Image (cartoon, rainbow, N blue to C red):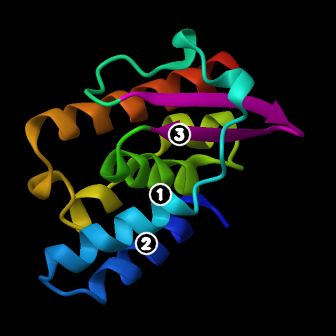
Amino acid sequence: MNINEIETEIIEEFELFGDDWEGKYEHLIELGKGLPKIEDKYKTDDRIIKGCQSRVWLHSEKIEGKVIFTADSDAIITKGMVALMVRVLSHQTPQDIINADLDFISKIGLTEHLSPTRANGLISMIKQMKLDARAYL
């Protein structure tokens, strides 16, 4: 699936909850529980995303032309947020990651329902993932 198709799938999932933000947060937490785990050897200080209030580790590697991300966080909502980003951007080409608009974030209402510190953390996650992708070009 390409990035736009994955974004559409996520938007449709979140639309099922309507205006029920408690349900949306629960879904986000469940997504975090299903996050492909980063190997412990990659949970190092140099892989912590700067700008996140919680600790978020991100590892990337390029396999057969695609960037594969794994991540973890010590906070459940943040872990769900990084799970969303991994779902959308992992297994994509570096150029597609760099060019991704990621407008699904606003379409599911996430930006307006995050605290300022979590919103900054999300921006930092996206920035780091795009920087990793750029390094693989």
- Mark 1 vs mark 2, foreground winner is 1
Residue 44 horizontal side relative to residue 41, left or right: left
Q: Is residue 45 above or below residue 136?
A: above
Q: Identify the image quadrant of the C terminus.
A: top right
Residue at 36%, 16% (x, y): give it.
50
Q: Residues within 10 Å of mark 2 (few under 14, many from 20)?
A: some
- The secondary structure that most of the magenta stretch takes on is strand
Q: Identify the image quadrant of the N terminus.
A: bottom right
Three-letter amino acid code at disc 3? Asp
Say whether disc 1 or disc 3 marks the residue closer to the N-terminus: 1
Q: Which residue is mark 3?
A: 72
The answer to which quarter of the image holds residue 126 is top left
The answer to which quarter of the image holds residue 133 is top right
Residue at 38%, 83% (x, y): give it.
12
Q: Nearer the viewer, residue 35 or 125?
A: 35
| Residue 55 seen by the camera | yes
How far apart are the two marked residues, 1 and 2, measured between alpha carbons?
A: 14 Å
Q: Which residue is mark 1?
A: 32
How far apart are the two marked residues, 1 and 3, measured between alpha carbons?
A: 8 Å
Q: Is residue 72 magenta?
A: yes
Image location (x, y in percent) of residue 130: 51, 29
Q: Which residue is mark 2?
A: 10
Look at the numbered discs 1 and 2 and tell me whether their residues touch, using CB distance below 8 Å.
Answer: no
- Please report the bounds of the magenta region as a residue range: 55-73
Image location (x, y in percent) of residue 2: 63, 62
- Mark 2 vs mark 3, foreground winner is 3
How far apart are the two marked residues, 2 and 3, measured between alpha carbons?
A: 20 Å
Q: Residues within 10 Å of mark 3 (few under 14, many from 20)?
A: many
Q: Is residue 131 magenta?
A: no
